[in-house]
Image (cartoon, rainbow, N blue to C red):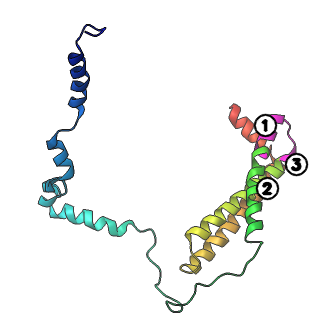
Amino acid sequence: MTSCGTTRDQSASWHFGDARQFAPSLNSRHRLLHPSDAAFSPAKSVLAKPQMLATIHGSARRSAILPPGPQHIEGGVNDAAPVPEPDAVHGSYHWTFERLLAAGLVPLTIAPFAAGSLNPTMDAILCSAMLLHSHMGFQQVIIDYVPKKRYPGLRKVCWWGLNVATLTVGVGLYEFETNDVGVVEAIKRVWKA
């Protein structure tokens, strides 16, 4: 007898009896290792309607945003890939400037609201930094998603469109800063409204 009032054989069967009910049966193991072919066959309702099946197969062709560009290979298969000339302005200095600008936006964004002062110089620096940060970010989007080699015309249009948009936003922010309340005060008023 144990302290619970059961014999040693009863307590052993009680512990192992619960564990056995959670063990998978031989039949379920067989189903996991050898799934039936019915699981991988298309539904009968789809096969009964050929136009629905054609719609499913045809939808994958229209998923591309831009069609593939011209397939032109310069050089031979044994030629080395061209290595661009090293340029620190578009390399490490550019990357460091982007990181410093992004890190500098954090205190520039918090300072006007925390201090509560309406300093037009601080407001202008914040607007300029945000505009420059946005411009550089959209430049990277254009560089990454509109390849110069495949779409030179579209790349040039996107590049000039970005420059025009940045200039327009810059003029708009300047007008808003000089002839109106400014960005920080406008955000404060909208927040309290």
In the picture, measured across the screen, residue 13 lies left or right of residue 110, that is: left
Q: Are marks 1 and 3 in contact (CB under 8 Å)?
A: no
Task: Give the tally of numbered discs.
Answer: 3
Please give the residue where the numbered disc 3 appears in the rendered image. 121
Q: Quadrant of the N terminus?
A: top left
Q: Going from the N terminus, do you reach mark 2 or mark 3 first?
A: 3
Q: Going from the N terminus, do you reach mark 1 or mark 3 first?
A: 1
In the picture, measured across the screen, residue 37 lies left or right of residue 129, that is: left
Amino acid beneath label 3: Thr
Q: From what the image shows, is residue 120 above or below residue 90?
A: above
Which structural element holds mark 3? Answer: helix
> Residue 109 placed where, x, y %?
76, 44
Q: Residues within 10 Å of mark 1 (few under 14, many from 20)?
A: some
Please give the residue where the numbered disc 1 appears in the rendered image. 113
Which quadrant of the figure has residue 174?
Answer: bottom right
Q: From what the image shows, is residue 182 above or below residue 151?
A: above
Which structural element holds mark 2? Answer: helix
Which quadrant of the figure has residue 134?
Answer: bottom right
In the picture, measured across the screen, residue 43 lies left or right of residue 80, that is: left
**Gap between marks 2 and 1 measured at Cα:** 17 Å
**170 vs 7, nearest the viewer:** 7
> Residue 189 placed where, x, y %?
73, 35
Residue found 55% across the figure and 78% down from its top: 151
Residue numbers of the magenta segment? 108-122
Q: Are marks 2 and 1 in contact (CB under 8 Å)?
A: no
Residue found 23% across the figure and 10% down from its top: 6
Which structural element holds mark 1? Answer: helix
Q: Are marks 2 and 3 in contact (CB under 8 Å)?
A: no
**100 vs 67, nearest the viewer:** 100
Amino acid beneath label 2: Ser
